[in-house]
Image: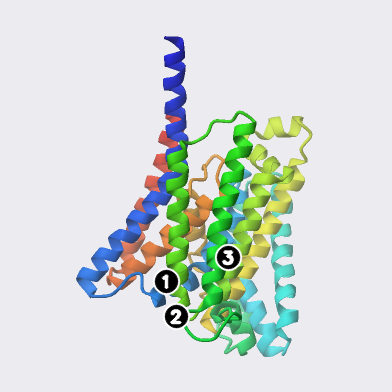
Amino acid sequence: MADQTAGTSGGKASLNINLRENGMLMALIAIVFFFLVVVRVTQGVDFLSAQNITNLFLQNSYVIIMALGMLLVIVAGHIDLSVGSVAAFTGAVSAVLTINLGWPVWAVIPTVLVIGGVIGAAQGYWIAYWRIPSFIVTLAGMLVFRGLTLWLLGGQNVGPFPKSFQLLSTGFIPDIIGPGKPNLTALALLALAAAALIYVGWRARQRNAAYGMAQEPIGLFWIRNLIVAGTLMFVGWKLASFRGLPNVLVVMAVLTVLYAFFTEATTTGRRIYAIGGNLKAAKLSGINTERLTFLTFVNMGVLAALAGMIVTARLNSATPKAGVGFELDVIAAVFIGGASMTGGSGKIVGVVIGAFIMGVMNNGMSILGIGIDYQQVIKGLVLLAAVIFDVYNKSKS
């Protein structure tokens, strides 16, 4: 009888874990299917056309890039409200350096990334070493860098950029295998990505089994991985029939892999989770909590600068109003992707899925002609539902 009770308890725990890990993926699929049907019926438009899929990547690249850094900040138990203003300011700096001062692109990009890191360090210093709440420091940063953006641009748009700079956002990977359509390079790269995902997932499953860790049902493992692999190949075919892989997609993919490896397979990554899980216990175990907190904000500043340059390149001008509301989309993507609002938990893959949920909703509602007022209401309700879902799961675990 005791064994049956333990088995039932373990089954419920396993079900809760699987629900948390796979619930957002199922939600994304459901949202895409909803817009696919509704847009086709009401507008006569293919929501999953090659052009619209490309637009989804181009329009939401900044959210995914900044959400990777925001996850580390939130996992460590903090928040960064300044990312939109930092992105706008660094985009303005790149415009001044490129257009007004005539710097080459190869010099502008690393310079702006360093400036973003310095901004993150300036904020992280007060948060990590002076223990000033991150909400206050980054709120001040949001105001400061919004004002500096207006000052630097003189209230005017600065542009256009040279083609070499625009390639940050609007460029595509050339087909090195063969000319014409479909783009064989795009198909080959996404096929390799799908195979790599399955291989890495299988190896992780075997490693967990060797350590006696609880495993999800094998059927669920294969269903999830085959869905993801099939989706990648579908997207690959669509992109290959259009213009190929956007440069920003490659950047996002590389960063996602690097940050997933960092958070799941490195000691430093696990220590950041320990800080958010229990700060006092982390300090007592010898973790330099101040330094790690400081570095998470430096990292956030660098990614905000990269996103700022990508947005500026896509608009082909630096504008004083750039970055308004970015922080809300980024924070929402992290929480919708499964990160805990109390810190200590969250996955990179979940953040990417959360960002795509936000992107698909924005894109679909725009195609349907839904006003920005209703869009904000709907996105706010989705964010609230994600947080309630997190709280409910914690109360049941």
How far apart in space, not on screen, are marks 1 and 3 (Cα)? 15 Å
Tell which circle, 2 or 1, labels the residue nearer the N-terminal end. Answer: 1
Secondary structure at numbered mark 2: loop
| Residue to which mark 2 is pinned | 242
What amino acid is found at the position of numbered circle 1 in the picture?
Ile
- Say which of marks 2 and 1 sits in front: 2
Which residue occupies 62% across, 72% down? 89
Residue 242 at x, y percent in the picture: 44, 80
| Res. 250 visible in picture | yes
Q: Nearer the viewer, residue 374 or 17?
A: 17
Mark 2 touching mark 1, by CB under 8 A? yes
Q: Earlier in the sequence, mark 3 or mark 2?
A: 2
Query: Is 243 left, or right, of 130 in this rendering?
Result: left
How far apart marks 3 and 2 lie (CA) works out to 19 Å
The residue sitting at 67% across, 35% down in the picture is 279
Residue 77 in view, yes or no: no
Q: Vertically, is 116 above or below 10?
A: below
Element class at badge 3: helix
Q: Residues within 10 Å of mark 1 (few under 14, many from 20)?
A: some
Q: Earlier in the sequence, mark 1 or mark 3?
A: 1
The quadrant where residue 173 appears = bottom right
Horizontally, is 213 left or right of 221 in the view?
right
Give the numbered dot on residue 252: 3
Q: Is residue 369 above or below residue 342?
A: below
Q: Please, what is the three-letter code of the amino acid marked with disc 2?
A: Phe
Residue 56 percent coordinates (x, y): 44, 70
Q: Nearer the viewer, residue 22 or 68?
A: 22
How far apart are the alpha carbons under marks 2 and 1?
Answer: 10 Å
- Residue 70: x and y in percent read 59, 54
* Residue underneath mark 1: 53
275 displayed left or right of 32 = right
Q: Which mark is residue 147?
A: none
